[in-house]
Image (cartoon, grey):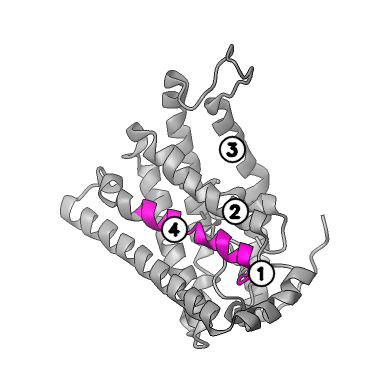
Amino acid sequence: MGRLTEAAVADSRASAASSAGSPPTPLPLSATYPSCTATMASSEEDGTNGGASETGEEREAPSKRRRLGWAATAWLTFYNIAMTAGWLVLAIAMVRFYMEKGTHKGLYKSIQKTLKFFQTFALLEVVHCLIGIVPTSVIVAGVQVSSRIFMVWLITHSIKPIQNEESVVLFLAAWTVTEITRYSFYTFSLLNHLPYFIKWARYNFFIILYPVGVAGELLTIYAALPYVKKTGMFSIRLPNKYNVSFDYYYFLLIIMASYIPLFPQLYFHMLRQRRKVLHGEVTVEKDD
């Protein structure tokens, strides 16, 4: 869902990243594609930087940032440094746990507070769009961030029997490496000092991490289905005074099915962005 969950959306060119500041995120979420491609939580590696197409909104963004001046740049720099540090802490905690315990069981419980804090903290990326310091669609940013939060709070947190599934470790590992790379990319871009390795990692790691993250998310949701069906959690049954029904089990099935059309679109778009940034190829994308 980029975990439902990666779709974040910014210009793939490093120079644009420097001027745009911190974009919204992901698990694992795209720039020139419509907002629907960002619904996956694996938008962790979205290959974008706050605005994809050459729209009027994006063209106006530089003047907005100039008016905001050093305060906006300072805040975005602080935000990206904080997020880079947060995901680094998470990565270290995960490695330490596995080295000490020798198993993935109990890993989620040990790192869940850090994960929930920093993933929920990413809601500020929607605020960045609202106030205009990052030139990305508020809707796209909202979908991307909420899809990750959905995976964290409404799947893994709420359905405790699945917390020890190997698939949870799968998407957590993909998210963590991706977010460290992504936020460090934006940090160095804001500081006008982008090491080539960070740029290279930003546009190469996703080739493996994005499919891994999506697989982890799908397998985790699949593992949750029997529990959701048995308990009827988050479902609304008729009759009720509002005359409305909702079945969380079928909702999750729809979410899983949405990966089929959305994953290939975003993945191949990211590959095109990679060629443009690392190899200087110019591609022309047709309007849908």
Above-or-below relation of 60 to 139: below
In the rendered image, which residue does mark 1 sit on?
Answer: 135
Q: Residue at x 56, y 61 (%)?
A: 127
Type of the residue with mark 4:
Phe
Q: Earlier in the sequence, mark 1 or mark 3?
A: 1
Q: Which residue is mark 2?
A: 142
Mark sitting earlier along the chain (3/4): 4
Q: Is residue 151 visible?
A: yes
Which is more toward the observer, 27 or 56?
Answer: 56
Q: Amino acid at mark 2?
A: Gly
Q: Is residue 41 visible?
A: no
Residue type pointed to by label 3: Ile
Question: Mark 3 — residue?
Answer: 255
Rounded to the nearest whole Å, what is the CA distance between mark 1 and mark 3?
A: 28 Å
Give me the C-alpha separation between circle 1 and circle 2: 13 Å
Q: Position of residue 225 (x, y in %)?
A: 47, 28
Q: Which residue is mark 4?
A: 121
Q: Which residues are magenta?
A: 115-135
Please report whichever mark, 4 or 1, sits nearer to the chain's N-terminal start.
4
Chief secondary structure of the magenta span? Answer: helix
Q: Position of residue 34 (x, y in %)?
A: 72, 55
Q: Nearer the viewer, residue 188 or 283?
A: 188
| Residue 155 position in % (x across, y down) | 44, 38
Q: Is residue 123 left or right of residue 97?
A: right
Report the mark closest to the observer, 3 or 2: 2
Are dots 3 and 4 in contact, CB under 8 Å? no
Q: Helix, strand, or loop for circle 1?
A: loop
Q: Based on the displayed image, in which of its 4 quarters is residue 152 positioned? A: top left
Q: Earlier in the sequence, mark 1 or mark 2?
A: 1
